[in-house]
Amino acid sequence: MRLRADIFVSSLLRRVFASGDFAAVEKKGAEEAGAIFIRQHFRDGLETLYAPAPQTAFGEDEAVDRLFEIRLARSEPEAVRAMLERERRFDPDLWIVELEAEELGDMIPLARDGSA
């Protein structure tokens, strides 16, 4: 059974705060199964956008409940906003979480495609 989106987001926020960084929910989505997008803000003004990984990224024996992929890496905020607006038109129930952290470590489970 998949962890509810609101519980995943709450856990992520607590982990970010516990590491001494800042996090906020920009847009609250469907509590049970909303897609989660994560904006990582850097001190230089650039952002990385993490999006849900496609189902093909999950292995048969994959124990991870949610996987993310980097959709935009260290990009201008306008590019991130434009992509999120397109996603919002497609899925109005999505979550957008903002993180102000230089390093995320293992807080966000990333799909492994050889480059992530």
Image (spheres, grey):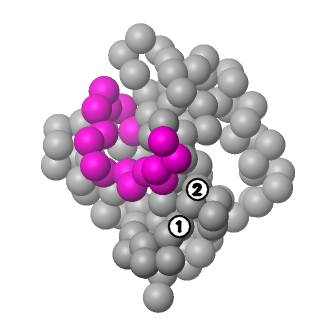
- In reply to whether residue 85 is colored magenta, the answer given is no
| Structural crowding at the residue carrying mark 2, measured as other residues with C-alpha within 10 Å and reported as few (<14), some (14–19) or many (≥20) | some
**x and y, in percent, of residue 18 in the image:** 16, 49
SS class of the residue under badge 1?
loop
**x and y, in percent, of residue 73 in the image:** 54, 27
**Position of the C terminus by quadrant:** top left
| Structural crowding at the residue carrying mark 1, measured as other residues with C-alpha within 10 Å and reported as few (<14), some (14–19) or many (≥20) | some
- In reply to whether residue 102 is colored magenta, the answer given is yes
**In the image, what residue occupies the spot 50% across and 70% down?**
59
Q: Quick one: 27 or 83, which is closer to the camera?
A: 83
From where the camera sits, is residue 102 visible? yes
Quarter assignment of residue 104: top left
Dot 2 amino acid type:
Ala
The magenta segment is 99-114
Q: Is residue 84 above or below residue 3?
A: above
**x and y, in percent, of residue 53 in the image:** 58, 56
SS class of the residue under badge 2?
loop
Q: CA distance from mark 2 to mark 1?
A: 8 Å
From where the camera sits, is residue 28 visible? no
Give the numbered dot on residue 58: 1
Q: Are marks 2 and 1 in contact (CB under 8 Å)?
A: yes
Dot 1 amino acid type:
Phe
Q: Quick one: 72 or 99, which is closer to the camera?
A: 72
Q: Magenta stretch mostly in which secondary structure? A: loop
Give the numbered dot on residue 53: 2
